[in-house]
Image (tube, helix red, strand yellow):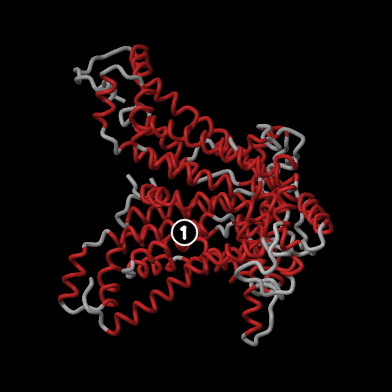
Amino acid sequence: MTSAETKPLGIQPRPPTKHSLGRRLKRTVSLYGWLYAFILPGIILLFLFAYMPMVGLQVAFKDYVIYKPLSEAPWVGFQYFSFITDPVFWQSFNNTILITFFRFLFGFPAPIILAILLNELYNAPFRRLIQSLSYLPHFISWIVVSYILYTFMQLDTGPLNMVLQYLGFEQTNFMGTQDYFRPIVIISAIWKELGWGAIIYLAALSGIDPQLHEAAMMDGAGRLQRILHINLPGIMPTVSIMLILALPGLLTAGYEQIYPLVNATNLGVSNVLDVYVIRLGLTQAQYSVATAIGLALGIVNTLVVLGANWLAKRAGQTGFW
Amino acid sequence: MKKKMSRADRIFNTVNILVLGFIGLTCLYPIIMMTALSFNQGTDTMKGGVFFWPRSFTWVNYRVMLENVELRSAYWITILRTVVGTVSGVFVTGLVAYGLSEAKLPGRKWIMIYMIIPLFFGGGLIPYYLQLRSLGLINSFWVYIFPGLFSIYYCVVMKTFFQGIPQSLKESMRMDGAGELTILFRVIFPLSSALFAAIALFTAVGHWNDWFSGAFYVTKGSLIPVQTFLMNFMTFDASQTYSRDNAQAGAQALAKMTTEFSTITSTSLRMAAVMVALVPILLVYPFLQRYFVKGVLIGSIKE
């Protein structure tokens, strides 16, 4: 910091003078003391809840037991990274990727389509109603969503099975087999965030110059043509930044949604990485293995985020920070 | 746009209205279904066919649930953590953001780097849990509050917003001898009330809907929040291998309650419990809508 940069706030700039370190420090504190005091809690909280857990990652390389301090635990090297040969780990890896991939494949375009359709709705009250309703699931907890799913698909009383029966199909125990687990997770995830995700695209659509549409209509362009050639290109910058922001999500299936849905019958497909780590670490107290898995995933995740950030910057966006 | 519509346009409109109407219905219907079931006699529900409204109306499901000591305690814990957590969280994050919004602050760049690193790399669940443990937060009410006091993401959003407030406003107040606290409360906070409302709303919903901390960082029954109570109450499938002690306790409590009244079933009780947890959100939802839409958009505008 040069002294020119630390000139007093709101006072006419003075020619830079050489002060001793002590005097400069004193001036900085008197000018910015309050501001530093405001920031301090944030620094302490991050230290306690973000940086200390990073230090705690050494558990992955130690024989840690809960009743002794971490510093006393002996180093064991990469012993706990043997999870890499564990078929259960790879099963949970595959389960994760399958869910996140299809969730991305169907879930990414869904809010864009919703926004475009809403944008074509000229009846304002109806449009507002649909918008309001579509945000609602975002505010419902995953636990309540699980209740909804179980109740909606229950045998003999659930609306879905009743409709199936009415139409002459067999009733199916959707929540009681693993066959439907992935579709259920993916569809409910899309359902929950569909309307919420559309907000940003709606804003982008409303920023498109109406003159473009008027000119296109003069030239005889139909509605579909205008959507394809004006609206879609118009929201492309937003789409590309959202696409990049979605990349890190490809590694996390989301324990908040999946954990409440896990039961004995669907374990083969519901055991995703998040759930696996929770079960190993918090339920079975195998801290070192669970930390080792967490560390490996964390590194991969960081690489993905950094890569996405690099992509965002290349695409002419500002990146994540 | 009010020109004569072509045939293709009319077809498009009709299909569009149908598709969007269907989407709106899928968002509304679960609430209707649960309301109907929660007001219907459990034994009647078992016959099937209750989809839109209660067939044999009763208050008994709610009466039993609202008399349940665990649910009441969970409800208070949730209200308490939501209020305390939201007010303190928004305040602390707002202070940090204000400090960081001062472009001339020496060392600001380094503090920003310090704040942003955790967005890219973290210790993961287990070291985090062990840290909570060594801080003595496990089995303490404060585990709901302290970790959420500061949010990096909201801090960046607020900082960006504060930087949009004309700097001359602050500087002229400083020249008049106003302290930073005065500037903060007289100028910055009032000018950012819509942003604060949105962030407070998101934080509050996050507190209200969190089941995870209650399930894993707390074992004391008296500290469990509503969502965790619901989680324990959910064991639909008796063969669930995952049920922990709490879940078994939930299942036992449920079994006891269903034997008290002959018309009650586990489904009807569950629906009443879910509605009790959901009603506050449904009630505030219509009034706060304009804030959260604004909040999403402010949050998406970057430096």
Look at 44% across and 68% down and name the residue there. A110
Using the rendered image of the protein, determine whether residue B193 is visible from the camera's viewpoint. yes
- Which x, y percent locates residue B127? 64, 42
Mark 1: which secondary structure? helix
Say what amino acid the circle numbered 1 marks.
Answer: Tyr
Where is B235 relative to A5, above or below? Answer: below
- Which x, y percent locates residue A319? 36, 50
- Which x, y percent locates residue B52? 60, 69
| Direction from residue B269 to residue B90 in the image, left or right | left
| Direction from residue A77 to residue B192 in the image, left or right | left
Circle 1 sits on which residue? A135
Q: Quadrant of the N terminus of chain B?
A: bottom left
State the residue lying farthest toward the bottom.
Answer: A168
Look at 55% across and 39% down and name the residue there. B148
Q: Residue B186's quadrant in the figure?
A: top left
Q: Residue B73's quadrant in the figure?
A: top right
Count of numbered marks: 1
